[in-house]
Image (cartoon, rainbow, N blue to C red):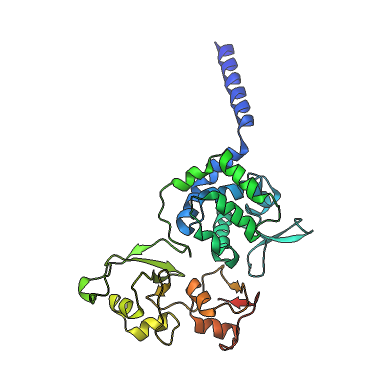
Amino acid sequence: MKKFLLFLMASLGLSYLVEAQNADPKEEYIKKYAPVALSEMKRTGVPASITLAQGLLESGAGKSRLATKANNHFGIKCHKNWTGKTISHDDDAKGECFRAYDKAEESFKDHSDFLRYYDRYKFLFDYDPKDYKSWCYGLKKAGYATDPKYAIKLIGIVESYNLHRYDNVKVEVISPDLLERPVVVPVKPSSIKYDEEYVFDVNRPVYKVNGVDFVYARVGDTYESLAAQYNLFINELLRFNDLKEIEDLYPGDVVYIKSKKNRTARGLDMYIVSEDGEDLRKICQRFGVKMSSVIKRNRLNPEEQLSKEQELRLR
């Protein structure tokens, strides 16, 4: 009986060992990090399929030196605005500076923010989040990697492992500028001035960026109508949005209904101007920071245009 039990245990152990050896490292990676990718899709709008495909490709399913030594799963280099840990690694050139993290989850979050906040990736969020092919080609177009076959490789990974199924998971994702999860702020009907020109939704979604409430303008909105809806003086609303006088509003414009902050959150210390003449106010609207604070912090002349690759300290 003992011999039989020993034989059975040995057989089970051998079976487990063979199964473990045959396990696909990529499948294991997907199983481990899919919840993180879904969480980031909900937080920022980056499709989970893209996050997982890039993680698999860039980290070699978590086996690369950057992934094992620095928890860097996406091959993100330091760039000028990085103040965290670093690791030296040979890539396009010898001894390049790459970001290092305490946990892999931090790398996933930084990857989402990297796509969300760097201007050259902004156009990606105009794509349908379920259109993984456009996202893959868009990443190559934006210069995420130098490999000419980068998009094809990503698409191959998505399709081989059916990663696009994760993009169909229902999550509350907001539109393009990808900020935080929206909260509905009910407005008392008595506080709204109705007329035949405007019809207001008392449950208009209110979003946050940098911890500051804002709404997206809709067809027919004006600064006057939004001031009335949220019980604000018109000059107050203009001040919140760095305006000295009333301007036209267009659908999709960001309108802050609370005062913006003097600085951005940690990790978003600096913005690199993407083109000559980029609008400083639009940059400040995007990051939820007061334009006056950015001007003061960077000793800017408000009359001078911004220059391409100029560094703006946001905190």
Q: Is residue 261 left or right of residue 266?
A: left
Residue 302: give x, y in percent of width and height: 56, 87
Where's the N terminus, which quadrant? top right
Q: Quadrant of residue 184?
A: bottom left
- The residue that appears at 45% across and 55% down in the rendered structure is 42
Residue 290 visible in image: yes
Which residue is at the far left? 190
Residue 148: give x, y in percent of width and height: 70, 52
Which of these two is toward me, 312 or 203? 203
Which residue is at the far front? 197
- The residue that appears at 61% across and 56% down in the rendered structure is 139
Which of these two is toward me, 175 or 18? 175
- The residue that appears at 77% across and 59% down in the rendered structure is 95
Q: Is residue 211 left or right of residue 196?
A: right
How many numbered callouts? 0
On screen, 16 above or below 134?
Answer: above
Which residue is at the far right? 94
Residue 102 visible in image: no
Where's the C terminus, which quadrant? bottom right
Residue 201: give x, y in percent of width and height: 28, 67
Residue 69: give x, y in percent of width and height: 68, 52
- The residue that appears at 63% across and 78% down in the rendered structure is 276
